[in-house]
Structure formats: structure tokens, C-alpha cells
Image (cartoon, rainbow, N blue to C red):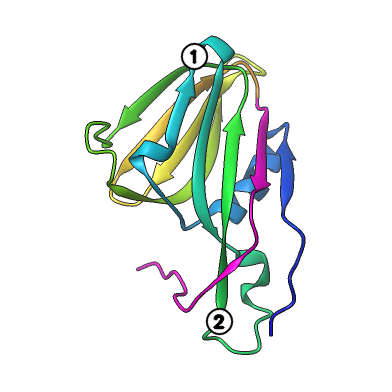
Amino acid sequence: MTETKPPLKLVAMDASDLEVISACCQDGVLKVSDLEYLGRENRFLLSLNRFVWEDADKKKSKKEFERRRTVLHFERVNGVQLMGIDRSDSDVVLSLLAVTFSEGEAPGGVVELVFAGDGAVRLNVECIEAQLSDLSAAWETKSLPTHSE
């Protein structure tokens, strides 16, 4: 039986914090329909099934890993651009590879969500203000995400 850890909750207020969130979200999977921009609230959010990397190397059996349902949201978003993602096919599955930040006029810039298959979402932000929250208990998966070099 695996030990149940409390849900992860992280806040990012700068590029270094965002790198930690990126590492936690790497290989998270979601559907196109899980991407949502709330323009009136200047908020962008996505729900994903994140791979629990922080525990992957601690597993006694390499055949048991975990995923958790997670929400990642960004505040102070002034605009969103999709590249290589077709919003009309809401059931397409995306795999999140990284969350990056390119500084523009400080403290603003562009947060980019990079997906496998050359898809990306670019968020024009006033500043970095993001939060990651696990919503549910973990469930077991036997699949360990891998990347070709």
C-alpha cells in the first residue's frame, strides 16, 4: 500500500517559482476543453492529470506511479494566443512539457505553456501570478512518461 501524501499547493510570483510549477506539471495530460480563458477576470486556467514526479523516484516498485487531478491558474492575463492547438476538437489530448516565462516590460511578459507536438499557449501577463492546486487523491498508473532525446 502506498502512503497518501497531502495535495500539492504551490504559488508562483517570479520566474524561479514558475520553474518549480513547470517541473511538477511536466507530462500532465489534458483535453483541449480543459483550457479556459476568463477574459473579464483576466484569468487563464487549465485542469490536468499531472504525473506525480516528486514521488516517482521514491517508489519501491517501479511499476506503480501516481497521477493527480490538478488545476493550474494564472492571474493578470491580458491576452491568450494558441499555436498548433485546434479549439474546435475539444477531445484532443495534450501533453504539457513545460511552463516558461519570457520577460517583456518588467514585471510583465509572456508565460508559455509548451505541449508535445509543437502546440503552445502564450499568455500575455502583467506579472507572474500563478497557483497550482491538486484537487483529488492520487490514483495509480503503471506508465512512466519518457522523452526521446
Question: Along the horizontal axis of the image, is 16 left or right of 47?
Answer: right
Amino acid type, mark 2: Glu
Could you tell me residue 136's position as x and y percent? 64, 55
Q: Are marks 2 and 1 in contact (CB under 8 Å)?
A: no
> Magenta region: which residues?
128-149
Q: Residue furthest bottom?
A: 61
Q: Which mark is residue 64?
A: 2
**Residue nearest the observer in this picture, 118 or 140:** 140
| Residue at 64 percent of width and 78 percent of height | 57
Could you tell me residue 82's position as x and y percent? 34, 29
| Above/below status of 48 relative to 55 | above
- The kind of secondary structure element at disc 2 is loop
Of the 4 image quadrants, the one containing the N terminus is: bottom right
Q: Which mark is residue 108?
A: none
Amino acid type, mark 1: Gly
Whether 135 is among the magenta residues is yes
| Above/below status of 3 relative to 25 | below
Distance Cα–Cα, label 2 vs label 1: 40 Å
* First of labels 2, 1 by sequence position: 1
- The kind of secondary structure element at disc 1 is helix
| Residue at 67 percent of width and 71 percent of height | 55
Could you tell me residue 53's position as x and y percent? 60, 65
What residue did someone put label 1 on?
Answer: 39
Q: Main secondary structure of the magenta part?
A: loop
Q: Quadrant of residue 64?
A: bottom right
| Above/below status of 89 relative to 97 | above
